[in-house]
Image (tube, grey):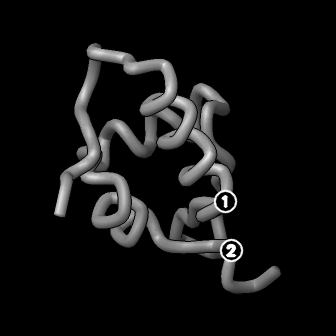
Amino acid sequence: MADDWITTREAVKLSGYHPVTIRTLIRNQRITGRKYFVIWQVSRKSLLDYLAEQEKRGDRRGPKPLTK
């Protein structure tokens, strides 16, 4: 699905995480990322799944998503 891929900038806005954290999650294969020419993209579904997993775990370490 084409809409599933978002830029890392959009991933930062969606998650509230720092860009370095997003890149680390991609590198550690915690979320799915791909490089499209020179732009890194993140699977929206994998990011949302990761955020839900972290919330469910109640993980207190690391940055937290921004609340609205």
- Please provide percent x and percent y for residue 44: 60, 64
| Mark 1 and mark 2 residues within 8 Å of each other at the beta carbon | yes
| Residue appearing at x 34%, y 68% in the figure | 9
- The circle drawn on residue 4 is 2
**SS for callout 1:** helix
- Closer-to-camera residue (16/5): 16
Q: Residue furthest right?
A: 1
Residue at disc 2, secondary structure: helix
Rendering quarter of residue 38 = bottom right
Under mark 2, the amino acid is Asp
Is 13 or 41 nearer to us in this picture? 13
- Determine which residue is flagged by label 1: 45
Q: Is residue 45 left or right of residue 51?
A: right
Please state if 68 lies on the left or on the right of 3 as rendered: left
Q: Earlier in the sequence, mark 1 or mark 2?
A: 2
CA gap between label 1 and label 2 equals: 6 Å
Q: Residue at x 38, y 71 (%)?
A: 10
Q: Position of residue 20 (x, y in %)?
A: 31, 40
- In the figure, is residue 63 to the left or right of 4? left
Query: What residue appears at the point 57 percent right and 66 percent down from the top-left corner?
Result: 41
For disc 2, the neighbor class at 10 Å (few under 14, some 14 to 19, many from 20) is few
In-image side of 37 versus 63 (left or right): right
